[in-house]
Amino acid sequence: DFGVFVHIGYATRGSRPGAALLHISQIDDDRIQNIHDVLRKGDTVRDARVITVDSTKGEVGLSLRNPRHKRRDLRTVKTGE
């Protein structure tokens, strides 16, 4: 199992119109062995954020994970930081 498709109420194209993919790696910061232990068909998914939009394919990717900190340019880091 690679994830779940979530109905987003927005017209998308692709393999599942009107749905966005919530990949198993984007559900929790901890590794999930079995997606069915976390989500089941008919569950409501709240607080998901859009992380990818492929306008060519008409696909949307979602995440429930906390946003990562912005990366810093290593050239700006000083010794001891």
Image: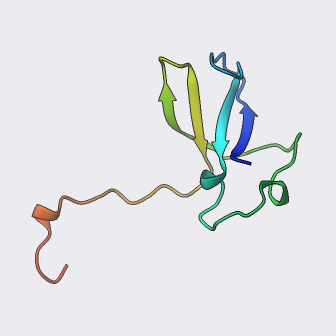
Query: Quick check: 49 above or below 27?
Result: above
Q: Nearer the viewer, residue 70 or 5?
A: 5
Q: Nearer the viewer, residue 22 or 33?
A: 33
Rendering quarter of residue 13: top right
In the rendered structure, the answer to whether residue 26 lies left or right of residue 38 reads left
Rendering quarter of residue 77: bottom left
Residue 73 image position (x, y, % from top left) = 18, 58
In the rendered structure, the answer to whether residue 4 lies left or right of residue 58 reads right
Query: Quick check: 47 above or below 78?
Result: above
Residue 23 image position (x, y, % from top left) = 64, 46
Residue at x 74%, y 48% (from the top left corner): 1
Residue 49 image position (x, y, % from top left) = 58, 42
Q: Nearer the viewer, residue 77 or 37?
A: 37
Query: Quick check: 52 above or below 79?
Result: above
Quarter holding the C terminus is bottom left
Query: Quick check: 56 above or below 27?
Result: above
In the rendered structure, the answer to whether residue 72 lies left or right of residue 58 reads left
Residue 10 image position (x, y, % from top left) = 67, 20
Residue at x 30%, y 58% (from the top left corner): 71
In the rendered structure, the answer to whether residue 41 lies left or right of residue 75 reads right
Residue at x 48%, y 55% (from the top left corner): 67
